[in-house]
Amino acid sequence: MSLTVAIQMDPIERIDIAGDSTFALALEAQSRGHRLYYYGPRDLSLRDSEVTARVRPLEVRDVRGNHFALGERSVYRLSGADVVLMRQDPPFDMAYITATHVLERIHPATLVVNDPAQVRNAPEKLLVMEFEGLMPPTLVTSDPEEIRAFRDEHRDIVLKPLYGNGGAGVFRLKPDDENLNALLEMFTVFYREPVVVQRYVPEVRKGDKRIILVDGEAIGAVNRVPAPGEARSNMHVGGRAEPADLSARDRAICNAIGPELRRRGLIFAGIDVIGDYLTEINVTSPTGIQEVKRFGGADGAALIWDAIERRLRNSAQTEEPAIG
């Protein structure tokens, strides 16, 4: 199966090829003989009913400092592609949401991964709240009184922006911390959306486990341990990756959410688990497949392309007219 694949992503010259999941997906696609096109979110256009992008043919290679080559730029009808990978990083803002609306016009005739309508309907800190009993006590609100009451009940809390990413804007407030009012004022200035407040889970000192799910099935995990003096475990802020196994609780969480992820067409998802609690379901531009493979786990890029190709084959078989 030779496919035409368009990759909507952030500037390819800036990525870290040792850890970037999009790069791993591009390498795997190329190794299978798929033709690659590259474009950025701002290259996407909707003219009348036609979705186009100003694309460039892409070749990738696993060579630091010389990891890609681009051909001449041209306007391309994305409905002519077999697959579009929507892989730009958050923030999940109106630009991101608009891109999902545009790409929804070609999906599923052109398979967009992940399904753009479901990405739009699955904000990462809200989707998790659909699965009762899996997450720590959590509040989403703009009401300062509700936040203060939540803190009075749980004492040690974490405050973070609803649509943040990479650990930006995440604060731990211990019971004796006097900064709550100042933080609420700051959040009001910088964010129009509600904030997320969660009971602090002390097991985070042992790590925040990223579990990769492909078409609803867990394929491996990596543990991200916070740096000394840091409450956040994200790699962007100094978290250390280490190998991790799936516990019985991890598998129970994956079994609970996997069928819903598959039903929604969220082929590539990364969930975050601290201790016994699910804290986020990442579906916009999940990461972690290179780290899992590096520690001897499954080849996530290969499994994702297996799932994509399987969906395309099943779709083609469904569309074939009956004979006789």
Image (tube, helix red, strand yellow):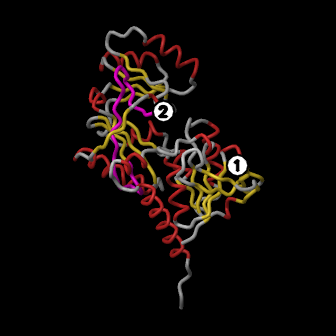
Q: Residue 146: which disc?
A: none
Residue at the image position 34 percent from the left and 47 percent from the top: 295
Residue 57 painted magenta: no
Residue 154 is left or right of residue 186, and the answer is left
Q: List x then y, in percent, for residue 211.
A: 36, 46
Q: Earlier in the sequence, mark 1 or mark 2?
A: 1
Point out the stretch of residues depicted in magenta.
212-235
User: Amino acid type of disc 1?
Assistant: Leu
Residue at the image position 73 percent from the left and 49 percent from the top: 45
Determine the CA span between mark 1 and mark 2.
Answer: 25 Å
Residue 227 painted magenta: yes
Residue 218 shows up from this direction: no
User: Amino acid type of disc 2?
Assistant: Gly
Nearer the observer, 115 or 60: 60
Look at the picture and state if 62 lies above or below 128.
Answer: below
Nearer the observer, 58 or 208: 58
Question: Label 1: few (<14), some or many (≥20) within 10 Å?
Answer: some
Identify residue for label 2. Answer: 166
For residue 1, what is the image quadrant?
bottom right
Nearer the observer, 117 or 288: 288
Secondary structure beneath label 1: strand
Look at the picture and state if 125 lies above or below 185.
Answer: below
Q: List x then y, in percent, for residue 63.
A: 54, 50
Residue 269 is left or right of residue 99, and the answer is left
Q: Residue 44: which disc?
A: 1
| Disc 1 + disc 2, Cβ < 8 Å | no
Residue at the image position 33 percent from the left and 50 percent from the top: 220
Secondary structure beneath label 2: loop
Q: List x then y, in percent, for residue 299.
A: 40, 56
Q: Can you tell which of label 1 and label 2 is closer to the viewer? A: 2
